[in-house]
Amino acid sequence: MTRTTRLSTEQRMAWFAGVATVVFFSLLLPATTALDRRTDRARPLYDDVLAVAQYEWEQIKETGRPAALTLAGGDRTGGETGLTLDSHTETVRVTVEGGGYCIEARNTFGDETGVLCFEGREPPTTLFEDRS
């Protein structure tokens, strides 16, 4: 004779909550992995923007003003403060505004930085400080 045990309502709810949690995290994993991949592919773009911002700071120290320029992936600027862009960086464009400068960039994957402006009074150390 086999005996079956019937689960109480609380036990069934706990079992359902456990299964729902496992399903939720199983579905969440691909989304977080895709977001992480996108972030990783955009990182060199932001590294290039910071490198160009530092290059512009060197231009300000040497000549007294930033230089407007447009660079494509793999391009190299001249001089001791030269830099080479990542091969996936499609374009980096610098516009001069007053004593400062603004940089925008895009990569071959379609990621864009938007316009990031620097006042040109101090060396750039980060892209995400308050620029207003």
Image (cartoon, rainbow, N blue to C red):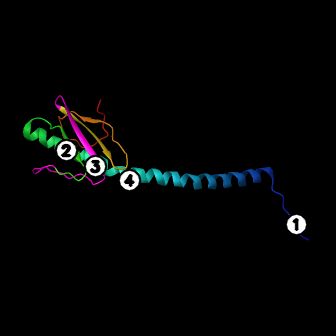
Mark 3, residue position: 47
**Which circle's residue, 2 or 1, is located before the other in the chain?**
1
Spatial separation of the CA atoms under disc 3 and disc 1: 66 Å
**Which residue appears at 58% of the width and 53% of the height?**
27
Left or right of residue 86, residue 57 in this image: left
Q: Secondary structure at mark 1?
A: loop
Query: Quadrant of the rendered structure where residue 132 is?
Result: top left
Spatial separation of the CA atoms under disc 2 and disc 4: 22 Å
Q: How far from the left and from the top, in percent, is residue 84?
A: 20, 53
Pointer 1 local density, CA inside 10 Å: few below 14, some 14–19, many at least 20: few
Task: State which mark lies toward you, 4 or 1.
Answer: 4
Spatial separation of the CA atoms under disc 3 and disc 2: 11 Å
**Which circle's residue, 3 or 2, is located before the other in the chain?**
3
Task: State which mark lies toward you, 3 or 1.
Answer: 3
Q: Which residues are magenta?
A: 77-99
**Which residue appears at 27% of the width and 45% of the height?**
91
Q: How far from the left and from the top, in percent, is residue 15?
A: 72, 55
Q: Is residue 94 magenta?
A: yes
Query: Amino acid type of disc 4?
Result: Asp
Query: Amino acid type of disc 2?
Result: Gln
